[in-house]
Image: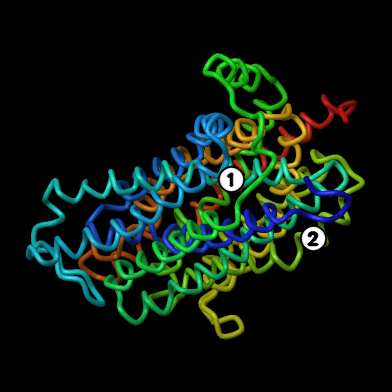
Amino acid sequence: MASGNRFTRVFWTSASVELLERMAYYAIFIVLTLYLSNVYGFSDIEAGIVSGIFSATLSLLPTFSGALADRIGFRSSLLLAFALLSVGYLGLAVLPTLFQSAGMVDYGLITTFTGLRESPLRWTVIPILLIIVVGGSFIKAVISGTIARETTTTNRARGFSIFYMMVNIGSFTGKTVVEPLRRGMGSEGLVVLNYFSAAMTLLAFILVWMLYHSRQEQGDVKNIREIGSSLLRVLTNGRIIAITLITSGFWMIYMQLYATMPKYVLRMAGDTATPAWYANLNPLVVVLCVNLVTRLMQRYKAVTSMGVGMWLMPFSALLMAAGNLVGSDDILGLHPVAFMMLCGIGVQALAETFISPRYLEYFSLQAPKGDEGLYLGFSHINSCIASFIGFGLSGFLLSKYCPDPQLYATHEAWQAASVHAHYIWYVFAVIGALAAVALFIFGKLTKNDK
């Protein structure tokens, strides 16, 4: 274990493979709804539902895979996870090429569907996504669980801050790869992108095989009854359940960076918009600010720090809505929708620096020794709830207020149908405000907690 303010080799190995895994994941996730629509022919609602289930399940399974990881060991779990992820990402690249070879679709700058959209074969993407979900669920539990095991009470907050910084460096780098491929190759670029993700997770597998050897693995093996007992303790912890539900409001707005924003800005600001690069403002701000915010807030309780961020979230959604209200003239060379979207993303990222690292710290402090994987796995349930509701809601809101222009005979008809597109963001602003109020009440009720 780390002594004082120093961190172990296993800590830095975990942080490094987390960076690689996040590069792979965010390169795909930022365009997942576009991938499903442009590569497989899913509608907005179908793409939203599939993406939501994917993201939600990826956040639900860590509770169980974390418990399994506590039993079989973190190293074995990571090797299994990165093997599955490599296979899954490779599948997302190879399967569409088989459909193209069969004459069911033609990829290029614009996709021409010649049978795939009507074929049940398009649903074969589901088992591929399931492989990624299972692999990714171990990552979420094991890496954060490793950070908890390999730090002490004196350096844990800083350890999670470093961990979260690495997450966002990976996010930034992964999204940076997207736009050159999308703009240069169109729909075909969305397919090729998956080879990059497969290469990153394969490299992570190699690093774990060579460098991840922790003494903290010893003595952690549990039988099934002990795992069930640990899970029951989590599910009956009222504070953990409450803060998980409350912070779902934060994640519901955050998820729109992937669920709503890409299609919204491309439709409202035009094809010259670069949604993946806009989304990159989020990890850039987090990387630059997370350590500073953690130091500034370290003498305050985790709930206090999270409260500051929660009050910023509804404001970020209102800024995103403002792009449709400030006129049609460019602002600093950007379409007003794009400019105000960047403003909202920046505020959202700042809110994240107050919330996410301290949320993980809060959970790690609740975890008994040997149950770190289970508890840190359960911490992602808020993302599960947010994904189910947020992605599903996104599909319906896009269809109602900002529909696909290709569904309309003229541009004028589409403009009439999307005149209230900004209403989408009002819905999420209300959700964020309710979550902020709920966390304020939670803080008052638990003010005597350590």
Q: Is residue 157 above or below residue 291?
A: above
Q: Is residue 376 above or below residue 427?
A: above
**Residue extending furthest bottom?**
333
Residue position marked by numbered label 2 in the rendering:
291
Q: Looking at the rendering, in which quadrant would you find the N terminus?
A: top right
Q: Is residue 369 left or right of residue 337?
A: right
Residue at image position (75%, 37%) is 362
Q: Is residue 70 left or right of residue 423?
A: right
Distance between mark 2 and mark 1 Cα atoms: 21 Å
Which three-letter amino acid code belongs to the residue tagged 1?
Trp
- The figure's colour scheme reads rainbow
Circle 2 SS class:
helix
Residue at image position (59%, 27%) is 221
Give whichever of 75, 371 is nearer the camera: 75
Residue at image position (41%, 66%) is 199
Give whichever of 191, 79 is nearer the camera: 79
Residue 264 in which image quadrant: bottom left
Which three-letter amino acid code belongs to the residue tagged 2?
Asn
Residue 269 placement (x, y as % from top left): 44, 73
Q: Nearer the viewer's eye, disc 2 or disc 1? A: 2
Residue 179 in which image quadrant: bottom left
Q: Is residue 443 left or right of residue 47?
A: right
Number of residues whose C-alpha sits closer than 10 Å to that of mark 2, classed few (under 14), some (14–19) or many (20 or more)? many
Residue 178 placement (x, y as % from top left): 43, 72
Query: Which badge, 2 or 1, is on the more N-terminal residue?
Result: 1
Q: In this view, does 127 lie above or below 277?
A: above
Residue 383 placement (x, y as % from top left): 55, 41
Res 303 label: none
Residue position marked by numbered label 1 in the rendering:
251
